[in-house]
Image (spheres, rainbow, N blue to C red):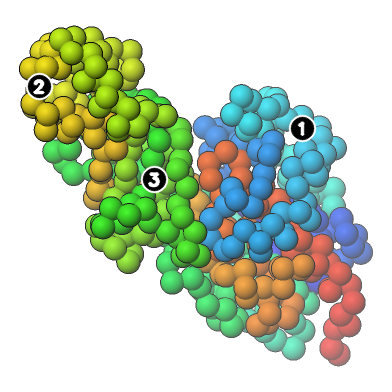
Amino acid sequence: MSASSADIAVVGAGAAGLFAAISAARASPALRVVAIDGAKILGAKILVAGGGRCNVTHHAVNASDYAGSTAALIARVLRRFGVDETIAFFEQLGVTLKREETGKLFPTTDQARTVLTALLVAARDARVEIIHPMRVESVTTCEGGFCVASEGGSVTAKCVILATGGLSLPKSGSDGAGFRFAQALGHTLTPLVVPSLVPLTLASDHWLKELSGLALPAEITVAAGSGKLARDANGKAIPLIQGAILCTHFGLSGPAILDVSRHWICATATDAESHLIINWMPAVTEASLDAELVASKGTSLLAVLHGRVPDRFLRAAIAHVGVDGTCGIQQLPRERRQLLVRLLTAQRILPTGSRGFLAAETTAGGVPLAQMNLDRLESLATPGLFICGEMLDVDGRLGGFSFQWAWSSGYVAGCAAAALAGSVTPKV
């Protein structure tokens, strides 16, 4: 690619970038829209999402399903292009979606390739020019608007849309370059930019690691070192998260752990003793379980608790607190009984860390929404610059919410860029 010009240059051709490019080209067909991506394989994150099936969206998406910026700001973007519009968009491309019991929407083919192919076909039909692999080295302002430079040449564009993703799954091409471009163009990032939807690690000798491969339902939240429930950067209480937890050889994974991970990681930034509180018996309280055990009198622990949690977990938990599961409750010292009750309904776990960006599904933190015109996702610092997707300080919980943010924000940025580019007369 030698020096050339375009009306709109989209940097990054992942989910958000492709959607922004398609939206811009459809809004103003006369414009030249180019999308530049450094990855050898386009849409790598789409292809691996949902176990290779691509969880396109969720049947019910609300601002409360996201963390980072405030719900009010997130809602302004989501309402512009919601779930119904997403379903209709893909149906028009021949991709029908099915709703599973969890509320997640997948393509009926159960193949992520179906989704990526549809996006690439839509881009081609809209005459979007996709240039890859071509790693962008810098994005600067210039007389014609912006100069997008790479080793293979440069593109001068009236408008630029940054959609490079965050830092998660760097092998897909998300290496944080977009953040550097945004900073060079007048933006700042949130104090924390950390992995989200990521497994957590435990100490090498933690007893839960001996249960590798075991999954069980649980309730989980984050507490500060003082024991009080932690709050996020907006002062909002971290929600109680319900879902499966998977014990692994390195620590903990599973939907509930992935959803709570960003909250714990952010909490440790201000309080190193922030920890997880896990109830392995959802809906059962510490007080109610203790009362149940006391009332069982001579019945053995194993008999009373049989079927309440997996037998493998129960035996390991009983052994961990140092009691004989065959003994009757009356033979169990009060402090040991309460220790077991607390472990089953309010276990305190202090992870040693996370699996990092290499294993994270998305990024928490980024460019604050307060720095953007939310009706356009246009930079307040540099007019003509638009930012969408994972680069913004918005990360969804597990279940298709991050993809919905990519579609919604990509649509808003793409349409706004098209409107601006169509009204800009290049300088001679």
Mark before the other along the chain sequence, 2 or 3: 3
**Quadrant of the image occupied by residue 116:** top right
Marks 3 and 1, Cα distance to the nearest angstrom?
Answer: 37 Å
Horizontally, residue 199 falls left or right of residue 368, namely: left
Contact (CB < 8 A) between labels 2 and 1? Answer: no
Which residue is denoted by mark 1 in the rendering?
Answer: 95
Q: Residue at x 66, y 32 (%)?
A: 105
The answer, for residue 41, to whether it is visible in the render is no
Tell me the kind of residue under disc 1: Val
Q: Quadrant of residue 46?
A: top right
* Residue indicated by mark 3: 221
In this rendering, which labeled residue sits more in front, label 2 or label 1? 2
Where is residue 162? Give x, y as percent: 64, 67
Q: Is the C-beta separation of discs 2 and 3 under 8 Å?
A: no
Residue type at mark 3: give it.
Thr
Q: Quadrant of residue 302?
A: top left
Foreground residue among 290 and 264: 290
Q: Which residue type carries mark 2?
A: Leu
Query: Which quadrant, please, contains the C terminus?
Result: bottom right
Quarter of the image with the N terminus in it: bottom right
Q: Quick check: 29 left or right of 345? A: right
Query: Judging from the image, what secondary structure is the residue with disc 2 in?
Result: loop
Sooner in the amino-acid sequence: mark 2 or mark 1: 1
The local crowd at label 1, few if under 14, some if 14 to 19, many if 20 or more residues have their Cα within 10 Å, is some
Q: Residues within 10 Å of mark 3 (few under 14, many from 20)?
A: many
Which residue lies at the image location 86% right of the left edge and 69% below the top edge? Answer: 419
Mark 3 residue element: strand
Q: Where in the figure is residue 402, as x and y percent of width and height?
A: 59, 48
Q: Which residue is mark 2?
A: 332
Is residue 82 among the parts visible in the rendering?
yes
